[in-house]
Each structure stands twice: as C-alpha cells, then as structure tokens.
Image (cartoon, coloured by chain):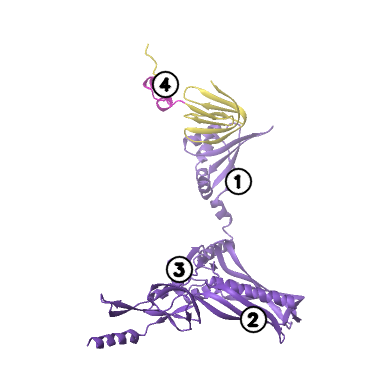
Chain colours: A purple, B yellow
Amino acid sequence: MFIKIVKWLRGCVLLVVKNKNPERFFNLCRKRNINLWNITHKESLDSSEYYFFMKLKDYWEIRPIVNKTKVRPKIIKRIGLPFLIHNNRKRYGYVCGVIISILLIYLLSLSIWDISVLGGYKYTPNIILNHLEENNIKPGTKIKKLNGFEIERNIRNTYKDIGWVSAEIKGTRLIIRIKETTMPSVAKEDLEPSHIIAQKDGEVLSIITKAGTPNVKAGDIIKKGDILVSGLVNVYSDFEEIINIKPLVADSDIRIKTDNKYKDTLNIKYRQKEYTGKSKLGISINILKLKINIYNPRISYDKYDIIVNEKKFKITNSFYLPITINTTKINEYNDLYKSYTKEEANIILNNNLTRFKEKLENEDKVLINNNIVIRYKNNEYIAEGTYILDEPAWSYKVINKNEWRLEEVDDNREVN
Amino acid sequence: MAKKFNAEDISNKIGIPSNILAGSQMIYAIGRGEICIENYKGIIEYNQNIIKIQAKNYRIIIEGKRLNILYFTDDEMYITGLIETISYK
C-alpha cells in the first residue's frame, strides 16, 4: 500500500512497444537501474505489443537506450500526482476551492461544535450546558483550551450529588457522562457541633446513637423541634462528677413514626388539543451564530404547536460541523373541553398516588398505613386522607455556644 | 593439463550454499502460476508463450501461457502466468 502511494506521488507511465524484439531494450534498462514492472505481451495476427510500467523520472533517461535499440516506446497512460497537477494547472478556481476547503476543515477541527450530556436524570442536559456556558465552555471553544480534568472537577464541585463525571473530547465533540447518586452529601461532615432535632411530631420507633447523648428512647412521643440526641456529652470523673462538657456533632440512626396528610385534586374539566390536520413547514440553516431562513411561513392559525427538529451536520461520528438545519413544523389545533368520567379520574389519581409512593421509597421512607379515599366535590375529584410513615424525620441544629459555656461557669461557681 | 576451476565444487566441499560463492541460479516455483529467478544475466527472448533467460553457464527456458514479467531488477525476476515446462539448455 505504502509503495503504491509513493509510486502515485512520484508518477508513472504505461508504455507500449510495437517491436519484434524488445529484449535488448529490457536488458539495457536493467543494466542502467531503470525499473520496469508488469511487463505483458499481447500478440495478434499483424502486430506484437509489449506493455510495461515505468517511473516518470526514469522515462527521461531512456533516450540513449531508445537510440541504441531503435525501439519506439509510446506513452498510453499517465498515472500519478505530477500529471494531476499538470492537467489542472489552469483551473485556478478548482485548485483554490480544494485548498480553501482543506483549510476550512482544518480550522473547524480546532474547536468543539457539539456538547453531549449523557446519563443525567435529575440534572437535564440543559442545566449542565448552561453551567458549562457560564464557565465559557460552549460550541466554538478551542479544543486546546479545554481540560477534561478541570471540567470534571468543576461539575463535581458545583453539583454535590453527582457522584461520577467523565469529560471526553472526541474529534469536535465534548461528551460529558454523569452519574447521580442518592448518597447524603459530604457537606454535613463539616458541621459545627450540633443536636439532632425532630422535624415532625410523632413516635420514636428506633434510635441507635453513635455520637452524643440520647434524650429519647423507642416508644417516646415527640414533638417537632424536640432535641432527640444532644450534641453535648458530659465527661465524668472517677467519682461520677461532671468535670467537663464536650460539644460534638450528634450522630444517630433514628426512625420516627409520623402522621401525614395527603391531598390531590383533579378538575373534572380538562382541555384537549384536537389537531385540525393543517400544518406548515419552515426551514432555516444555522451557521455558527448566523441564522438563515430559507422558508419562514406566515402563521395564520389561532392556536398552534411549533415543533423544531434540529439536525447537526457531521463528517464522521466524531467530527461535527457548526452547521445545523432546523425544520419547523407548525400544527394547528382547536381546544376541545371534556370532562373526566369517574373511572378515568380514578385511574389518574391512583397513578399519582403510586408515583407518590415510589418517591417516598426513594427517599428512604416506609409507608406503614394509609387511608386515602377518592370523592367528588364541587366539580373536582379529590383524593384525600392520612398516611403513616416510618421515616428518618430529623435534622441538625447547631449548638448555641451559650448552652454549654454557661454550664461551665455554673460548675466553676459551685467549685468556688 | 590444469584442472578447470569450478566454484560449485569448492562451495560444495567447504559446505557453503553454492548460490553465494558460485552465483548459481535460484528458481522458486510457487504453485504453477509464479516463478522467481535469482542470479540471472539477461533476457534472451520474451513473449507470452516463452521466456528464455541467460544464466551463467546455461539457459533457462520457461514455457507456458499468458506469461508476464511482474518485475525484474538487477538480480531478481518474477514471472506469472500458466507455466507448463521449465527446462535447461
């Protein structure tokens, strides 16, 4: 393959000799280090022809041999770059076009033109793209200026619950893959000494304290704001006297049984779009930031949907160009007012409830019991009731410095 | 009478392959369609049915059909085609 490319770059010629005895010519060529290849002989009734290939450079050196052997080689085919250049020497526009397109492709390959965000569930691609744009990473940024490691660190630092980020530059594409985690954020570790307090009224189901002094036990009824685990730990002497109070971040696994209310309403009337079937098409091309409307239809409809399809131009899967074709489709519709039947309302409200239950599960909350009923009132279907949860309804409350320092002063007074 | 100097005999006696010292011809035939000849002197006759090659002390005659010379350099020649006979003269 490499040899073929070199031969093409240097150029070669296919020659024909119409002579009975070209052997002497071949031998002399060999003696002068002129390489011939693909020598074939074709014989017909009235002629005998020998075809062979020769380098273009060697062709200029065979004159003495030709004179000596009286063989007349004739060129029948020219192959290679030198001939291509020679043939196109007067086509300035063509040559300029080729050079400009090569230059353009080279210049375009220096920047990224497509940013893809994959794997996000909570963070949509738009959020990540906006964040990147704030950091000056957008289509058109020079690839040289991008640093995958920096981008990864930036995203990880901004969004604490993105557990894993990878930024890959592939051709003119920047591919960002993210994985979100439901793990508690690390920030809590940096808290100041704090208590654990109840977020809701309820009953303590279980409490396992890792750090701090527990104020409640399983089965206790608690109110919102009660300190469940105190962040103050008494330090006792050998005589069981308090000699010091040490503040720390209370840590405990607490499950609380709480009563909660649920309400979901559904209006009996709803609007449905009825498409009339009339539609208009518009086409526009975006080159860099320039928008060229090829056809922009006048919208004469009262109510309509606009659906824009964006198609990016690319040379290969990883070489995207800054050219997009947008096709706009405008569909006309009429509003149709309908009412839900009881069955339909039941299905919708039950689906909402199922989604709500799934959400609770994801938040580490266990539904113990629920009595939610669906009823009809004032043109509305209402799903209403109470449900009992087993949940970790607690939060941190930073310890006020006075809480433990005052006690310390009291201790001193006692001593005095 | 002085004995004639024979390079092939000497190379046989001292155990060196004869093509190195004596410049003997090497012919590799690959199947029936390809032949590679090394250490030849020149082409005597060539057409699509016969190729006569001058070697050091004799001639090699290759007969066949549609014989082509794929390439030939100073000491190597590669022939393709349907080969029928290889003879020495």
**Label 2 neighbour load within 10 Å: few <14, some 14-19, many 20+:** some
**Label 3 neighbour load within 10 Å: few <14, some 14-19, many 20+:** some
Residue extent of the magenta highlight: B10-24
Q: Kindly identify which chain the residue marked by label 2 belongs to.
A: A
Residue drawn at the location 68% of the way across and 33% of the way down: A44
Circle on res. A384: 2
Per the image, the residue denoted by label 3 is A152
Per the image, the residue denoted by label 1 is A77
How far apart are the alpha carbons under marks 3 and 1? 58 Å
Was residue A298 drawn as part of the magenta stretch in this picture? no
Labels 3 & 1 near each other (Cβ < 8 A)? no
Q: Is residue A362 visible from the viewing direction of this image?
A: yes
The x and y percentages for residue A124 are 55, 72
Q: Kindly identify which chain the residue marked by label 4 belongs to.
A: B
The x and y percentages for residue A230 are 39, 79
Nearer the observer: mark 3 or 2; the answer is 2
Circle on res. A338: none
> What is the three-letter code of the residue carrying label 1?
Lys
Predominant secondary structure, magenta span: helix
- Looking at the rendered structure, whether the residues under marks 4 and 2 are on a common chain is answered as no
- Looking at the rendered structure, whether the residues under marks 3 and 2 are on a common chain is answered as yes
